Amino acid sequence: MEREFQWELKEILFLFLLLIGIELVGVYIGKEFFTAHPLRVTLSLRGVDLFVLFFFVREKWKWVWGEGRNLRGAGWGVGTSLVLFFFLSIIHFLPYPELKQFLKFPLPEVSFSEIIILLLLPVVVEEIVFRGVLYPFLKERWGVSWGILLSSLIFAIFHFWSGISLLLPFLGGIVFAFLREKSGSLLAPIIFHSIGNLEFILFTKFLL
């Protein structure tokens, strides 16, 4: 990896503090002005996040995206999604309600088309931040294994308010980072993350 694409710790901390600040300000403004339209708050926040990320990573995008071919990344993402679909289908027929409840996805009070939008924008933001920026930074310093584990742990911590067990985003983060590493492309975790969330939503809505 070319050294000019290396992140500095102060850059990582600045990015996370900036995104947290955007989230806190956005939530406050949303409660004040968009109480009847929570989707608008989420879409606005993710739009601001993407705008910030564009300027933050524009000179290092090749390093963020990876060196793998897009077709290979798409294959990894779709293939892993099929594995997850098979896994959830098996879970549906098992007599373990506790396991099914553990895998339950919190559904927002929005339409199906709005859910699709909510799946796409946050996923792109999260994958750029955690698998495009944070994971390569940690991997460069402590290797692949620690990079995957630490980035997944931080990813899980940032989901503590989502209403699901932290174990689920931690395990998901491991898979996302593994896909980024094996495919060499950010496209793989983006595709799997989006389709996987949709599969969990369908599992929650129709199979529980």
Image (spheres, rainbow, N blue to C red):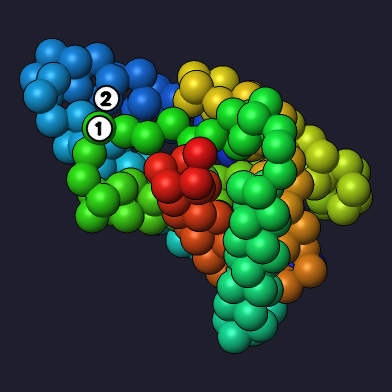
Please state if 184 lies on the left or on the right of 128 as rendered. right
Please state if 69 lies on the left or on the right of 139 as rendered. left
The residue located at (72%, 71%) in the rendering is 184
Q: Is residue 185 visible?
A: no
From the top left corner, tell me how far across and down residue 113 is, in percent.
23, 55
The residue located at (19%, 22%) in the rendering is 30
Closest to the observer: 72 or 1? 72
| Quadrant of res 205 | top left
Q: Which residue is mark 2?
A: 26
Q: Which residue is mark 1?
A: 109
Q: Image height check: is 72 above or below 30?
A: below
From the top left corner, tell me how far across and down residue 70 is, in percent.
58, 81
For the N terminus, give its image quadrant. bottom right
Amino acid bearing label 2 = Gly
Amino acid bearing label 1 = Glu
In 3D space, how far apart are the residues under numbered discs 2 and 1 (Cα atoms)?
19 Å
Q: Image height check: is 29 above or below 88?
A: above
- Helix, strand or loop status at disc 1: loop
Q: Is residue 164 visible?
A: yes
From the top left corner, tell me how far across and down residue 94 is, in percent.
71, 44
Please state if 59 lies on the left or on the right of 94 as rendered. left
- Helix, strand or loop status at disc 2: helix
Q: Nearer the viewer, mark 2 or mark 1?
A: 1
- Specify the label residue 96 is tagged with: none
Closest to the observer: 160 or 7? 160
The residue located at (25%, 32%) in the rendering is 109
